[in-house]
Image (cartoon, grey):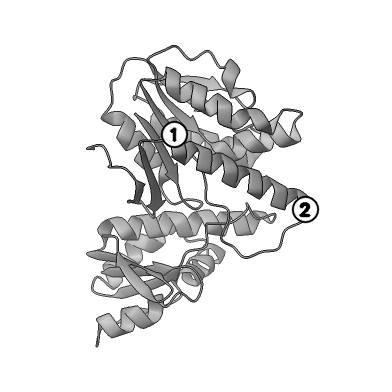
């Protein structure tokens, strides 16, 4: 599994596609976390399921944690859960690439 | 050695801070907790952090305000968590935000090792009200002062430390 992250619209999805032709690309993983929470799935369970079901996938997510603490409890919970799930995936990923202005930095 | 760790919410800063501490002397370990427990959510967070720290030999000081008055002995190995809460308490609970940076410098000078945890709250593009903007500006100033006095500074990105300054100690 490879992980591509970055702030909104930083080009992580394009990088993931261009560097991994033919691979299964899972986009908007941060939104998958939100859906999982709504279905009662914990971030730990979600990360484990992704690793089990798609061990060779390329996962793309937005970084959403670098802001003022949200007022709504469900937004705070989502933010924490995205962090938790991505920490778990990053630890298991072969590579982690962070996009800034379309430029990929291989941080792992 | 003084270390500053920043990063977004839930990015693994605390876990990395604890890994750094693990490689430091066990003697004189102090955990400076700045968050006030206001509700079940913060109580749960405190509980989670406490469970992770268990067995690491920390003496915990709940210190939400006036960091300079915390009874930290010279030569301590301290983990301070975190600056955003400390600043919020100084600003909104009758403290004085101006003392945060000098208090930090004095603490760093006193400690054998100090690991400071802060937060990146600057990149969500939301236009906040004046008071929140002022909070952000002050936190940025304090973060910059903390980085200035640190030997090693890193942004933790989903558990991966990305060096901003200096060299990471071996962990």
Q: Pick whichever, A85 or B14, lies toward us.
A: B14
Quarter of image, res B4: top left
Chain of the residue displaying label 2: B
Q: Give the crowd class for mark 2: few <14, some 14-19, many >=20 residues within 10 Å.
A: few
Q: Which residue is mark 1?
A: B149
* Residue at 28% over, 75% down: A57
Question: Which residue is located at x 56 percent, y 17 percent?
Answer: B70
- Position of A96 relative to A60 (above/below): above
Does any portion of residue A105 appear in the rendered image? yes
Quarter holding residue A13: bottom left
Quick one: quadrant of the C terminus of chain B?
A: top left
Q: Label 1: chain?
A: B
Q: Is residue A74 left or right of residue A24?
A: right
Which residue appears at 40% of the width and 77% of the height? A102
On screen, residue B24 above or below A5: above
The spot of residue A88 in percent (x, y) is: 34, 56
- Tell me, yes or no, whether the two marked residues, 1 and 2, touch with CB atoms within 8 Å: no
Disc 1: CA contacts within 10 A as few (<14), some (14-19) or many (>=20):
some
State the quadrant of the N terminus of chain B: top left
Of all residues, the one furthest to the front in this rendering is B148
Q: Nearer the viewer, residue B133 or B58?
A: B133
Disc ID at residue B130: 2
């Amino acid at each position: 599994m490879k992980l591509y992250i970055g702030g909104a619209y930083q080009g992580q999805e394009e990088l993931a596609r261009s560097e991994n032709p033919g691979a299964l690309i899972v986009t908007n993983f941060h939104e998958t976390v939100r859906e999982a929470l709504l279905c009662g799935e914990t971030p730990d369970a979600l990360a484990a399921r992704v690793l089990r079901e798609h061990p060779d996938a390329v996962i793309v997510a937005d970084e959403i944690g670098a802001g003022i603490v949200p007022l709504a409890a469900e937004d705070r919970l989502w933010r924490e859960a995205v962090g938790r799930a991505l920490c778990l995936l990053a630890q298991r990923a072969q590579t982690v690439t962070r996009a800034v202005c379309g430029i990929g930095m291989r941080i792992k | 050695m003084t270390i500053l760790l920043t990063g977004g919410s839930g990015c693994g800063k605390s876990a990395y801070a604890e890994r750094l501490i693990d490689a430091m002397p066990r003697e004189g370990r102090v955990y400076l907790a700045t968050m006030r427990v206001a509700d079940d959510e913060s109580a749960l967070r405190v509980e989670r952090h406490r469970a992770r720290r268990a067995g690491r030999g920390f003496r915990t000081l709940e210190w939400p305000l006036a960091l300079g008055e915390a009874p930290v002995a010279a030569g301590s190995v301290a983990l301070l968590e975190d600056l955003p809460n400390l600043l919020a308490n100084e600003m909104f609970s009758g403290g004085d935000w101006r003392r945060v940076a000098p208090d930090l410098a004095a603490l760093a000078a006193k400690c054998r090792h100090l690991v400071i945890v802060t937060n990146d709250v600057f990149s969500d593009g939301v236009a906040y009200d004046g008071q929140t903007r002022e909070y952000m500006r002050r936190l940025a100033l304090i973060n910059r002062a903390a980085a200035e006095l640190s030997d090693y500074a890193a942004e933790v990105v989903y558990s991966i430390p990305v060096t901003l300054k200096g060299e990471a100690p071996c962990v």
